[in-house]
Image (cartoon, coloured by chain):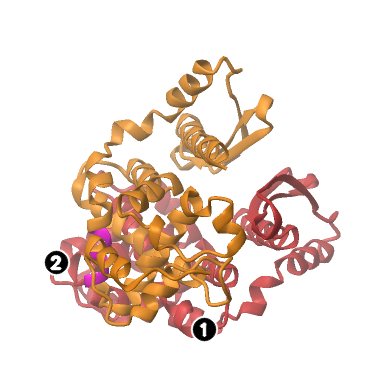
Chain colours: A red, B orange
Amino acid sequence: MSLPSQSLLTALQRRLGYQFADTDLLRRALTHRSAQRDHNERLEFLGDALIGMTAAAAFFQRFPDADEGALSRLRAAVVSGQSLARIAQSLELSNCLILGESERKSGGRHRQSILADCLEALAGAVFLDASVAEAQQVVAGWLQESIEAASPSDVVDAKTRLQEWLQGRGKPLPEYSVIEVKGVDHEQSFRVQCRLVHLQLRTEAVGSSRRGAEKLAAADMLEKLADSVDD
Amino acid sequence: MSLPSQSLLTALQRRLGYQFADTDLLRRALTHRSAQRDHNERLEFLGDALIGMTAAAAFFQRFPDADEGALSRLRAAVVSGQSLARIAQSLELSNCLILGESERKSGGRHRQSILADCLEALAGAVFLDASVAEAQQVVAGWLQESIEAASPSDVVDAKTRLQEWLQGRGKPLPEYSVIEVKGVDHEQSFRVQCRLVHLQLRTEAVGSSRRGAEKLAAADMLEKLADSVDD
């Protein structure tokens, strides 16, 4: 296990836009479970919640006319593993990660899931080190570019994007089916499944319309495909 | 659509432990979509995120030895619709809800989902009306009793509780199956399905062990059963 140098940590804090009072928190946030017992997974749990709230507040302000379904989809896109990994890359977390031997040898430093989890853990560490208001501001800075790039029309279109992704690879189209319908009239909710038979993958989502639920399930499937390409 | 009287709103704010500067926000938070266009669903989106963060921070502090899996399960239990509805009842939200005609006639005032959603919307309204630190404190007050009552051993036990629930009603036991396994070695994740064939219900969950995922899927199933009993 090799620790990042002081100069790497100083540069990282500059990029993060936050100077830790307690640098042990910073070190723990960078420590993957493969490295030692005192790893970053509890911080990741905390940071995930802070990132979720920060993104929710940002989208709420940014799109005053978007309904809660659109807001949820926008947020889901920005807090997805893929999106957080991209932010982690832009903050150059890779060279500061503290990994165990086997993880390091197998290229863990550049694995999307490890990078995304580490970004969440850093958010958790800032949350503990600062006031909640300051932590929210710091995290909003990390998310800013992704939030500004997101628009309600992007996320509505996941079904089309999934179809194009599959067609571009000459694969069969997804199968959608309604698994469950609850409630009556304008308060119905639809649970829909999206299946890719050739890959034995499936996702489920709930929405207030069949079509809305299909889009959410398609968005999850795209995420799953991106993960599996990454692995 | 009948509006709650000023004295009802004053008493409610006393129970909430928060006095709104902008009482329009309070009114909107109480307005179900059945009542009018200007309803509480966007606020609910925002409040859900604040409640999630508040619960995460509270459990993180309260259980310094719990791993992130246990923390997630604790949080999920406290922010579940059932749990939030119970808190909404203890805050006596029912008599302040602003509902449309048909919702009112069909007993919407006491429906768990409406109560839970309204509590989330109130959290969102406090978030907009106050500083984030104050909002977190107010919401922590609402959750306090549930958080103090929760213990890591409760939520681990969802499989057992589901089994007992079914046996107590003379119903067949759930069927668990692994749908997907991802990753290698100590980084595997298991997607597991829990089915109640006789009720045509199923839930899915992902965990870092098969058994852990089964427990999560069982917890979701318990939630689903509680909802369907409520409807």
Near-viewer residue (B136 or B67): B136
Amino acid bearing label 2? Asp
Farthest residue toward the left? A21
* Kind of residue at disc 1: Pro
Between disc 2 and disc 1, the foreground one is: 1
Q: What residue would you read off at disc 1?
A: A64
Determine if residue B58 is in view.
Answer: yes
Name the residue: 35% across, 54% down: A45
The residue identified by callout 2 is: A22
> Could one spot residue A1 in this view of the protein?
no
Q: Position of residue B61 (x, y in %)?
A: 20, 52
| Residue plotted at (24% across, 73% down) | B19
Q: Residues within 10 Å of mark 1 (few under 14, many from 20)?
A: few
Viewer-side residue, A225 vs B126: B126
Is A103 placed above or below A125 here? above
Q: Earlier in the sequence, mark 2 or mark 1?
A: 2
| Quarter the C terminus of chain B occupies | top right
Q: Examine the image and state in which quarter residue B20 appears.
A: bottom left
Question: Quick check: A198 above or below B171?
Answer: below
In magenta, the rendered stretch is: B134-140
Q: Which residue is painted at 58% across and 19% down in the image?
A: B173
Left or right: A145 in relation to A198: left
